Amino acid sequence: MKQKSKGHNRRALALAALTAMSLSPIAALASTGGKLLLTGGVSQIEGAAGGGLTPWAVIGGYGTEGQFGAQAFYTRVSTDDYRLGVTGLALGISDRVELSVARQRFDTRDVGAALGLGRGFLLEQNVYGAKLRLVGDAVLDQDTWLPQVALGVQHKRHRQGDIVRAVGARNANGTDVYLSATKLFLDSSFLLNGTLRHTRANQVGILGFGGDRRASASLQLEGSAAFLLRRDLAVGAEYRFKPNNLGIAREDDWWDAFIAWAPSKHVSLTLAYADIGNVVIRDDQRGWYLSVQFGF
């Protein structure tokens, strides 16, 4: 009983801190109901809530315990030689479970013609995701170093299996499993996230799964850091380590630097400069990432 009382006291202290820290930028992010603005992250390119490149342990939408939340998004990434368009949505249940789906469309532009596929050939895959918050609460647990921790899965199904196998992929479909830990420091308006992903996806699955260099899955690290400049504006950076499975196409790590603006809990915009390195026969792919999200 004493341990239970202590847990209730911690949450009460955190709630009191939220109302008392009126001078902290993040403390002013209270939405009209549910979670604080931006603390649910934005939409990641595979559909999960988090940063643009990597999932966080947070649950999508603004629903808290006993509530539903949801977010829908469109993301476009344009580099020198490619374009990626992603549409998707995520449903949050009682701030505990997240279900998501996303469709990725990768435009090969002139590279498609060089590879004999035709200019502007589209590589497409669907991503079905689920995430479960295991322990911790990123907002309420301010008196402990314990982060919010979530276990997630992303099942990916490519729509052009014959083509990705032709470039050396072992499979057209695959499943990533990841563990994310997110720590939010309310008093300094700072967020840190680390994700460990078990994957054999080539270019997040756009080029299939596994290859002649490595057929089995490997563990890859992903990290994010964000700082809230004011009640509706955040800046940050992400880094995503990648496997290198295909002999035909070296795969580089990805990174970005972003700014996210949320004029209300119903809409947010994210702009980033992204570097995705080598993709198939083109090196130094860099460009702009733009995402718009609608949610409640």
Image (spheres, grey):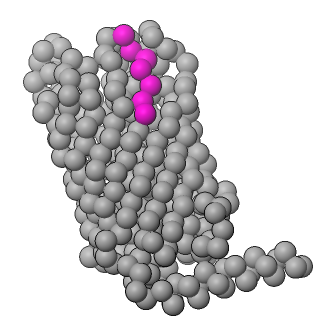
The answer to whether residue 47 is left or right of residue 178 is: left
Q: Is residue 255 above or below residue 39?
A: above
Q: How many callouts does the rendering have?
A: 0
Q: Is residue 230 above or below residue 106?
A: below
Residue 123 location (% of width, % of height): 27, 29
Magenta region: 241-247
Residue 266 location (% of width, % of height): 33, 74
Residue displayed at 48% across by 57% down: 192
Looking at the rendered image, the quarter that the C terminus falls into is: bottom left
The answer to whether residue 261 is left or right of residue 178 is: left
Whether 117 is among the magenta residues is no
Q: Is residue 237 above or below residue 140?
A: above
Residue 97: quadrant of the picture: bottom right
Q: Main secondary structure of the magenta part?
A: loop
- Of residues 62 and 225, the one nearer the viewer is 225
Whether 245 is among the magenta residues is yes
Residue 1 seen in render: yes
Residue displayed at 55% across by 30% down: 219
